[in-house]
Amino acid sequence: MAAIHDLSARELAAAYARRELSPLEVARAQLERIAAWEPRINALYLVSADQAFAEAHASEARWRAREPRSALDGVPITLKENIYTRGDPAPIGTRANEDDPPQAADAPPAARVREAGCVLLGKTTMPDYGMLSSGLSSLHGITRNPWRLDRNTSGSSSGAAAAAVAGYAPLHLGTDIGGSVRLPATHCGIFALKPSLGRVPVYPPYMGRVTGPMTRTVDDAAALMNCIAKPDARDFMSLPYEERDYSAALDELEPRGLRIGFLPGMGVGLSVQSEVRVAAQAAATALAGAGCVVEPVQSFLTAEMLDGMCRFFEARSQNDLMQLSEEKRAKVLPFIAEWCTWRAARFSGRDVMQAYTQVMGMREAALRAIEPYDFLLSPVSPILPYEAELAAPGNDPQDALPHIAFTVPYNMSEQPAASVNWSYSEDGLPIGVQLIGRRYDDNGVLRLARLVEKLRPTQRPWPQ
């Protein structure tokens, strides 16, 4: 048997059923793994050892009685800091909230994984307010990429991605409003699904905001979707509940005749680096070789749409910042404070509505782009991981989001999108590709991702 930290969720559950491993034994091994890696990568905001042992002990009793709560009973998991858990503070990555009180209730995804019997090891780090794609936080410091410690994880689900690479657990949950599970996934070489808006209930809901699985394998993400895609009345934007086994028929997608639009560049934001472009083209070629009909697609995104999205995010965050006392504002990461005020402080109501109109135009254009196809394929990030200490590529707070052009449209259009690692740069850094489905076709995206997993080149061993 492989080392415990390299076992998938399915393999752990099978070992529990055969009584070859116990949830308590696994929790102990995973906490030791965390202790060994944390001084180097700083992926966890909170380690819940006592709670984890208590939950593992209860799970062990259920397995002994052959009455597990779910297929994931006893499997370790981490949750991003902003997914509220009862009894834990959620300062949202910023020192401005360092004295926040504990949360009174579990958010819907946290409630679902507890009901499934998962063992919560801790909460993962994120940058201030979850804005900007970086592992830099005024509260947590720097979360580093385990593949190379001088490289950025991207964000905002920075700790979740680093924890997955380091083998803290097979299951991790992040959140995504502009690329925040997919960008860390591509920079860290893992799988991540941004579900359709409302597929996984969240609280509080917001335009574009989703919670999604971040795992080493598509199979583990599908198993986690079975738990978290259950209904919760608190999410007033959620989709009608669809009873579905996301793990079923995962390997049965027929590629012959599948129509895939290949979007190699967006034409706005950062230029696609050559190694990223080569990886995306290789994935397109492999899918065509498997029988898919792959056609190039022109970009649907304009500079005005991307800038409108940036202005909307700036206005939203500037509003949050201005609600803080002067003392608390001074604790926010200076990069974030400048980013959301340098022009938003002067926005009129007309400026904000014009930005919102561009966001809606982006939404319409994204949906129109996929209309002739079953799926789209593109890069996830146009660039390879940048320096760990930076808040954004280029480190310019007045141009902080040019790298999200491939990801943010699908938050606004509510489409499911996933990042699957494809290959590696000459320096050994991961390069993922993005798979985008029609609205509500989360199951289809998972099945296509599983096909890509089988077609991709041999993957490198995880960092040890």
Image (cartoon, grey):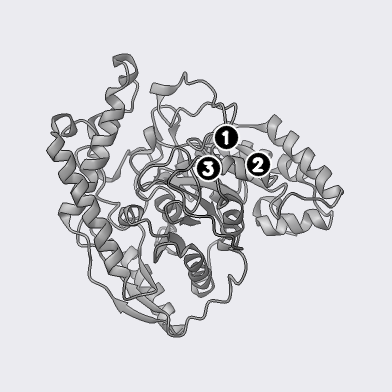
Describe residue 143's horizontal placement relative to residue 7 as left or right. Answer: left
Q: Which mark is residue 114?
A: 2
Residue 5 % position (x, y)? 66, 50
Q: Secondary structure at mark 3?
A: loop
Q: Is residue 108 visible?
A: yes
* Residue type at tag 3: Ala
Instruction: Name the residue tied to disc 3.
Output: 233
Residue 302, quarter of the rendered image: bottom left
Q: Secondary structure at mark 2?
A: helix
Residue 355, quarter of the rendered image: top left
Among the two numbered marks 3 and 2 on one chain, the one whose residue lies closer to the N terminus: 2
Residue 124 % position (x, y)? 52, 38
Instruction: Name the residue tied to disc 1.
Output: 106
The mark closer to the camera, 3 or 2, is 3
The residue positioned 46% from the left and 85% from the top of the image is 256
The residue positioned 33% from the left and 28% from the top of the image is 333
Q: Secondary structure at mark 1?
A: loop
Within-10-Å neighbours for mark 2: few <14, some 14–19, many 20+:
many
Within-10-Å neighbours for mark 3: few <14, some 14–19, many 20+:
few
Query: In terms of depth relative to the viewer, which is nearer, 185 or 343?
Result: 343
| Mark 2 and mark 1 residues within 8 Å of each other at the beta carbon | yes
The residue positioned 27% from the left and 57% from the top of the image is 363
